[in-house]
């Protein structure tokens, strides 16, 4: 089995002390048909890093599809991220006016400069992040991506192991039925031939224009057509072929989700055909069991990248 199989779901987090506070980075992903990325900069001043964050994740995480969210914030800040030139003067004026209104109602102490600078919106978001902070964020993000990829890889390998066991189960069910099918068909042919012969005996006895040989030819033709309709050898062969393709894909690794989803559809189609042709309880039971396993496999595939 390849070791580069990834689940769409994953999580990674990093916490690191920096000069301006504790850096917190989280990267998580859940299932989605397409690739959606959300950048959540919960601390003013970090939004300007979004292009670099997107690029680093795109280069390092190898994400093909899924809903991905990256959250970065700094807690316990000891100083602001921005230079004084980025201060939103209008926001400070509004804060001052609000403070005066509050003081008319309740007695509160004045905010310190440090407290004011920590209020969301005091700095303009478009301001560039301090170079040291940017370096810390990108380094922390790389470590977070590594942990994120590890979690996705571990989950992907577990899913692959489950699917390989399900492949074994499908193969077992098919191979248990295969030797029984000729016996089932021969028994049904014999039963049909006997019934047709009995039914046509009355026709011959009623002075039919048909000869005995013509009646026998017609019986043989009907029995042959019937045997063709209920023969499931091709369906079983194709089931085993699809199982082989799944195993080969898992061994190769990479982005398996869409490829395996198509193969699962083909497996389900063959199981449905087997069910529709079923002419004995053994065939019906096998078809039902196959559909259960295939559905379980489909659920696993939905989690793969």
Image (cartoon, rainbow, N blue to C red):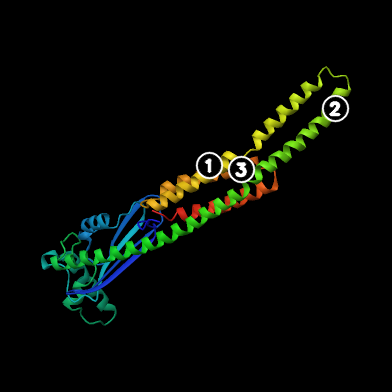
Position of residue 8 measured from the top left corner of the image (x, y, whole percent) = 39, 57
Closer to us: 178 or 114: 178
Residue 238, disc: 1
Residue 201, disc: 2
Can residue 27 be seen by looking at this rendering? no
Position of residue 38 measured from the top left corner of the image (x, y, whole percent) = 31, 57
Q: Residue at x 26, y 68 (%)?
A: 73
Mark 1 vs 2, N-terminal side = 2
Graded by Cα atoms within 10 Å as few (under 14), some (14 to 19) or many (20 or more), the crowding at tag 1 reads some
Query: Relative to 7, is 84 above or below?
Result: below
Mark 1 vs 3, N-terminal side = 1
* Left or right relative to 211: residue 137: left
Task: Name, please, the residue furthest toward the top.
Answer: 209
Q: Residue at x 20, y 76 (%)?
A: 115
Distance from disc 1 to disc 3, alpha carbons, whole Å, reads: 11 Å
Closer to us: 119 or 221: 221
Position of residue 241 measured from the top left corner of the image (x, y, whole percent) = 50, 44
Q: Identify residue for label 3.
A: 274
Closer to us: 114 or 147: 147
Mark 3 vs 2, N-terminal side = 2
Q: Residue at x 33, y 66 (%)?
A: 12
The local secondary structure at tag 3 comes to helix
């Amino acid at each position: 089995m390849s070791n580069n199989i990834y689940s769409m779901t994953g999580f990674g987090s990093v916490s690191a002390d920096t000069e301006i506070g504790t850096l917190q980075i989280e990267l998580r992903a859940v299932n989605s048909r397409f690739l959606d990325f959300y950048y959540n900069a919960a601390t003013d001043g970090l939004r300007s890093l979004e292009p670099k964050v997107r690029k680093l994740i795109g280069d390092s995480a190898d994400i093909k599809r899924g809903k991905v969210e990256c959250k970065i914030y700094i807690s316990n800040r000891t100083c602001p991220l921005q230079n004084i030139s980025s201060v939103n003067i209008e926001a400070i004026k509004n804060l001052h006016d609000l403070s005066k209104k509050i003081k008319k109602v309740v007695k509160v102490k004045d905010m310190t400069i440090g407290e004011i600078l920590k209020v969301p919106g005091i700095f303009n978001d478009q301001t560039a992040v301090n170079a040291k902070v940017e370096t810390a964020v990108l380094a922390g993000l790389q470590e977070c991506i590594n942990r994120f990829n590890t979690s996705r890889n571990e989950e992907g390998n577990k899913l692959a192991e489950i699917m390989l066991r399900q492949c074994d189960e499908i193969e077992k069910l098919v191979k248990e039925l295969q030797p029984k099918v000729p016996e089932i068909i021969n028994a049904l042919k014999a039963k049909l031939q006997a019934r047709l012969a009995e039914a046509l005996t009355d026709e011959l006895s009623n002075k039919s224009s048909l000869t005995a040989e013509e009646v026998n030819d017609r019986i043989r033709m009907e029995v042959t057509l019937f045997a063709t309709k209920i023969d499931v050898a091709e369906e079983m062969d194709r089931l085993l072929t699809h199982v082989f393709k799944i195993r080969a894909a898992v061994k190769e690794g990479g982005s398996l989700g869409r490829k395996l989803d198509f193969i699962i559809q083909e497996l389900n189609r063959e199981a449905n055909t087997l069910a529709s042709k079923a002419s004995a309880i053994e065939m019906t039971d096998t078809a039902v069991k196959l559909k259960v396993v295939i559905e379980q496999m489909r659920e696993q595939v939905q989690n793969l990248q």
